[in-house]
Amino acid sequence: MTLSIAAGIDAGQKYLDVGFAPSGKGFRVANASAGIAQILARLAGAGVRRVVLEAVGPYAQRLIQALALAGFEVSVVNPRRIKAFRDAEGRRAKTDRLDAGLIARFALVMTQAVRPLPSAEQSRLKALSLRRRQLVEMIAMEKTRLKQASEPLLIDSHRKAIADLSAACASIEAELASGLKADPERAATYATLTSIPGIGPRIASLLATDLPELGQIDRKAIASLAGLAPHVSQSGNAPPRAAIAGGRPCVRAALYMAALVAVRHDPWRKAEYEAMRQAGKPAKLALVAIARKLIVTANALVKNKRPYQNQTMNP
């Protein structure tokens, strides 16, 4: 069905600015329960089906949940795409009201860029995964500080902080594992991922939570989402140059670590890596290529619902 009207919302701490496309009209309400109720009523009265917001900050969470429960087609878009759309329109002025109208026009025109909102459980598991990464980073920083400390009081403080953070991380990991096991589809994805050499439990849970598209799109799209697809840049007589860009940084970093493990412990990946090195490829480029092979393999296995077998899989 062709979209005839769409709404864009710019969410701030105090206010919610709503814009309509193609009419260009809009309004502002307080970012509170009464304001959200007013938005729902006015969107329904205007015949709006699609509502788009920018993925910035926590201020829109209550509104997003209310819109989803009310049956609207809600999407959260990367702010860089909205900025690029503003640049494409040749606009420079920027206010909350103008941003709401800009997002509405984006929703009406860039239909392929708008993706469905993740479910409440997907959002919860993704938040748990993010918190685990934060705790792991804090533990690593405290361990570095501990090595540099000489005062007994400071040493005890760092050790206590490490113990407390480790306990918190274990609690988050247990909750994350429980959430993955509770859903048969996610549990099957997790089991498939852990069967792939190089992908351990932590990386498997990250991919299952932060890359829900796994097994649902083609190999090129999944490599792009993971930030591992080479994008060619060429102009005039200059030779073409390809480099990875974009994607989800946490997924790319996890797969790079998986590639490091795979080339050490999986004879097949080790042979591929050594062949690239002997062909003159830099080490980092070869590891990125192995990481891309891992996610392409994972995508095919999850799609076909079968475990890894290096004799038959050759992405």
Image: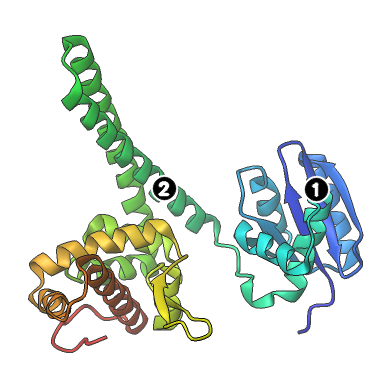
Q: Which residue lies under the disc numbered 2?
A: 130
Relative depth, front residue between 291 and 204: 291
Q: Which residue type does callout 2 highlight?
A: Leu
The answer to whether 16 is drawn above or below residue 207 in the figure is: above
Colouring: rainbow
Residue for point 27% across, 24% down:
161
Q: Position of residue 190 (x, y in %)?
A: 30, 65
Q: Secondary structure at mark 1?
A: loop
Q: Is residue 180 left or right of residue 291?
A: right
Q: Residues within 10 Å of mark 2 (few under 14, many from 20)?
A: some
Relative depth, front residue between 14 and 35: 14
For the C terminus, which image quadrant? bottom left
Image quadrant of residue 120?
bottom right
Q: Position of residue 179 (x, y in %)?
A: 38, 54
Q: Which residue lies under the disc numbered 1?
A: 95
For the N terminus, which image quadrant? bottom right
Q: Which residue type does callout 1 highlight?
A: Thr
Residue for point 13% across, 69% down:
263
